[in-house]
Image: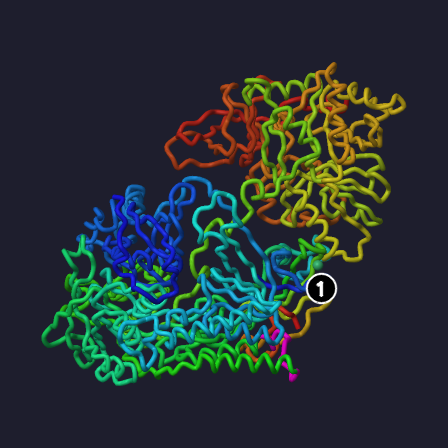
Amino acid sequence: MNSIHRQVNRLAAGGRLNRAKVIRFWYDDRQYEGHPGDTLASALLANGVRIIGRSFKYHRPRGLFAAGPEEPNALVQLENGPHTEPNRRATEVELYEGLIAHSQNCWPSAAFDVGGVAARLSRLLPAGFYYKTFMWPPRMWRAYEKFIRHAAGLGRAPAEPDPDHYDKRHAHCDVLVVGGGAAGLQAACAAAAAGARVILADERAEFGGALLERGDGDDGDGDGDGDCDSDDGDGDKAAQWLGARLAELRRAAEVTLLPRTTVTGYYDCNFLVACERVTGHLGPSRGDRAPRERLWKIRAARVVLATGSIERPLVFADNDRPGVMLAGALRAYINRFGVLPGKRVVALTNNDSAYLAALDARRAGAAVEVVDVRRHPSGALPERARARCIPIHTNCTVSAVECARGWSRGRGVASVQVMALSDDGREVRGAARKVECDVVAVSGGWTPTVHLFSQAKGALAWREDLHAFVPGRPALANPCLCAGACNGAATLAECLEQGRAAGVDAAAAAGFTVDDSADSAGATAAIDNASAQLNIDEPRHAAMRALWILPCEHAIGRGPKKHFHDLQNDVTVADIELAAREGFEVSEHLKRYTTTGMGTDQGKTSNLNALAALSESRGLPVAALGVTTYRPPYTPLSFGAVAGQQRRDLFLQKRVTPMQPWHVKRGAVFENVGDWMRPYYFPGKDESMRAAVQRECLAARNAVGVLDASTLGKIDIVGADAVKLLDMVYTNAWGNLAVGSCRYGLMLNEHGMVFDDGVTTRIGEQHFHMTTTTGGAARVLNWLEEWLQTEWPDARVYCTSVTEQWAVASLSGPQSRALLSELCAPEQPLDAESFPFMSFRELTVAGIPARVFRVSFTGELAFEINVPARFGLALWNALFAAGEPYGLCPYGTEAMHVLRAEKGFIIVGQDTDGTVTPFDLGMDWMVSKKKTDFAGKRSFSRADTARAGRKQLVGLLTEDPALVLPEGAQVVAELRKPPLKMLGHVSSSYFSPTLGRSIALALVADGFQRKGEKLNVAFMDGGGHQARVTAPVFFDPSGERARG
Amino acid sequence: MLLIKCPWCGTRDMSEFSYHGEAHLLRPPAPAEVDDAQWGAYLFARKNPKGLHRERWMHAHGCRRWFNVLRDTRDDRIYATYRPGDSPPDVDAGDDNGENNGDNNPGNPT
Ligand SMILES: [Zn+2]
């Protein structure tokens, strides 16, 4: 359908709109028009769209209920394809040309929804229905879950990567002001005048807060002719004041104004997180813009919270019908957006503020009646309404809502039934009167927005006159001041005064005091002047009646009508009563059981009414029940903003070795080891991984292979007490290690468990070169530093990480000596006598000064060539330039694993898991018997460490030599019906090309005594395989080859 | 996110630091001479107070030095930071959770 709808509800004038410009947008595949200044919500209302979605549980049609972030109903799917975003509140989406939105939680459309049948089954969906209905029998959960996810569908996640980019910014300030309404602006001006660095953030596009929503209805002498454009109204006064304040703030050098910025979290020590919509309000980008959103991380010396208040609804029979909305929202739509959502308005209230909406609606041309639950509303505002001939039904309530054309496809409210209240307000009586209307504006008073204050661990205090929680004592760690409506201020004058005082005090606490200088005095005077300019004559509001849950002809929950207190999560007063009866009567339990307040709106309009219902049920005052904990974020944050630039290549740092370009060119497949990218294997053309790994292994055994071992952790240890340190952190003794010699070491924690291993070499008398596992380098350095700094602060040792300073090419294989000697001068002998196994020489390799270590992790003749990192690639190239005649083959980490497993060399973290001692590994020979102390030694004699039956490292050879056991598989005595007695697990398993069969390492209870036994390995599919227990060394057990 | 004053570098965001558990644990000077219960206490027994806690932190993304922090676990208030080897300052957090203390600067140890 392409015909464009008319803006039937748009007023001819008024509001902060640019009517000269038309914006076209699409909602549920129909085209509409709006104007700059509109939100999606106001534009839809202007076009007479009343049903914006279906409710979460019962699929009841719902319309716009609010005008701000508290909106519970109007969640839409914004845009399509990669730009799509679910659960956007229409009240917060600024209209832009070409906007596309779809209703959610309904099929095929919000107006006609198949799922509406759920509403008829509502008796089957009581409080706690997830727990009661769907948790049993457990095997059915998968089936239920599908149904629930579909039925509960809160929009669709995008299926494509987000094409936009996001940013983050850290900021420090003296005073952060949250909320740019009257109080916040005043606070920012006062703090800025004192010289403080100020950040002022407001969630909306325009500063001004509730000032933007004031109409001439506030004005005592309005003419009532519906002309909202008169030039002497309060709306204009407010606009002038606003302009002056903003101009002042823009002039100030140290003030940062952040409109469209929602402060979502208030964390320890005045650290706050805010999300700025930089370009997101302009619609999908084509990649040519500033970031879509920017996440601010702000540290403020002082915070001023001027977060305003949110109107509290009244809960009456079928109060969820489209057309029922907050009275303040009605005012906002009329005065700010120039939209009158209906022609006939009923205002239902327990206080005076709904009269402002009634007066504004009357002035905008609507027929208006007020239903006031109070017996004798007699304040200035009701008087004003009477003067405008607005009928007031006192001591009455709305007891029923009728919708046009049946509610399931209804167009919303068509009339309400008004009945008198009993004395206690719990029942209705007398005759019902029908009042035709299309809007029901409700007000149950105002709830201070204390979310951020409470997040900051501030204590809330109950204000009996407001029937609400207000900020009490702030937490010591989060010094903040509250001002305005969020602090319980009732009038504009109070807001201004509180704002000014908070600004001055916050600046003073941050070290900026207004002295008596002319400048400061001038600034103060300007602020006082400004307050005077906004001297709007505001009638004092009379007291409210403490009644929010309003009766109908049936007891609540007994008849067909529903009293919703939580519109977003479809929770009714009856649900609360049921939960309380079932024992969930603590507010935190009630919340989780009924899901009240757990929607994306976090119960902004429902929490207090839920407490009111619970209070009724339990016969306790609300103050005694306490609120549930407020947690960040105040409104949802996009994943994009949270991720910022940390995505794709910037998600995690990637460490690469100097030889990386060669590996890439050679077509290496990489694996991540810690943060490192290491070649996993080097496949030839059309070569499988298995074939490549087999080829690489055989080259290293039969000719010569080279591994890029640059990632090995390396720590340079220098000092007179270096030996003392090594003796303490390794199990073996180091004092007798000759200069130029290498030694393998096992590192234990104080529990006696292996946590790292590696070769350490004595470079000089007081100088050692320690190597660690690739992933353990940082952990080991911390371990050494911890001993040095906290146990022996007087020890003369320095430890320096040199992992990235040395590039390492590890030559391995019978031809490695011949290849290396080609690159060394003849006067550098490499024969076994001059350069024996487990020793180190400083050589010149291919013209590069090198430290060469004769250590072997493959069991072959091997040389680890260390050169300064900047020469790493040159060394690598030189090796390959000379290597061809020797059959030099690069090998990756997988071949390295196979080669070392053939030799039974452990990998810490694979063959150990933090519960393995050196004895469990059969490495008793590594543990010094002479040293009286080293880390972990004392724990060897602890009962559990010394007991029999511990798991021990063994080899496993399968019956079928071709079968490679899965790593992690359980080793069991026999395969039979579960449960099986588990003896251990397979820790390493490969196909060994050298042996022509599979090999495995395993940790098995009493493994050493089981050599020769046949055990079983169980597979995930229920099958298994028999394997024989052997020693863990499969190849060259005497170690001849490495020493050669 | 807490602000923590490194005794060497000054006040920094908590994200620069790593936490290392209870401070002032004494490793038995001659482990071989203590019984299993004493060794077990050194390995495993940790205080978990509701109130003042002396704990070790390390300026991992800064000077990489260990130091001690006196923190109230009830409200994360940090009363002091001090170098290893220094004795903890004597503070009285009281039962009123510090309410009477006038200095409420964010994270500024006294
Ligand atoms: Zn530091």
Q: Residue at x 68, y 69 (%)?
A: B88
Pick the residue in front: A662 or A129: A662
Local SS, label 1: loop
Against A219, residue A761 (above or below) is above
Q: Identify the magenta region.
A: A507-517
Asked if the magenta segment contains residue A637, the reply would be no
Residue A686 coordinates in the image, percent (x, y): 55, 18
Q: Is residue A512 magenta?
A: yes
Side of A788 relative to A50 (left or right): right
Q: Could one spot residue A944 in this view of the protein?
A: yes
Q: Residue at x 39, y 77 (%)?
A: A462
Horizontal side of residue A228 vs A662, given as left or right: left
- The reply to whether residue A587 is in sight is no
Image quarter for residue A534?
Answer: bottom left
Q: Residue furthest top?
A: A885
Report the predominant secondary structure element of the magenta stretch. loop
Three-letter code for the amino acid on which mark 1 is drawn: Pro
Determine whether the beta carbon of the residue marked 1 sits less than 8 angstroms from the nearest atom of ligand 1: yes
Q: Residue A198 location, x and y as percent?
A: 58, 68
Ligand 1 lies in which image quarter? bottom right
Q: Which residue is mark 1?
A: B7
Chain under numbered label 1: B
Residue A331 rendering spot, x and y as whole percentages: 32, 69
Locate the C terminus of chain A by quadrant.
Answer: top right
Q: Is residue A202 above or below residue A724?
A: below
* Picture quadrant where residue A297 is located: bottom right
> Which one is in front, A307 or B57?
A307
Left/right placement of residue A144 relative to residue A768 reads: left
Give the class, few, some or many, for how many residues have Cα within 10 Å of label 1's Cα (few <14, many ≥20): some
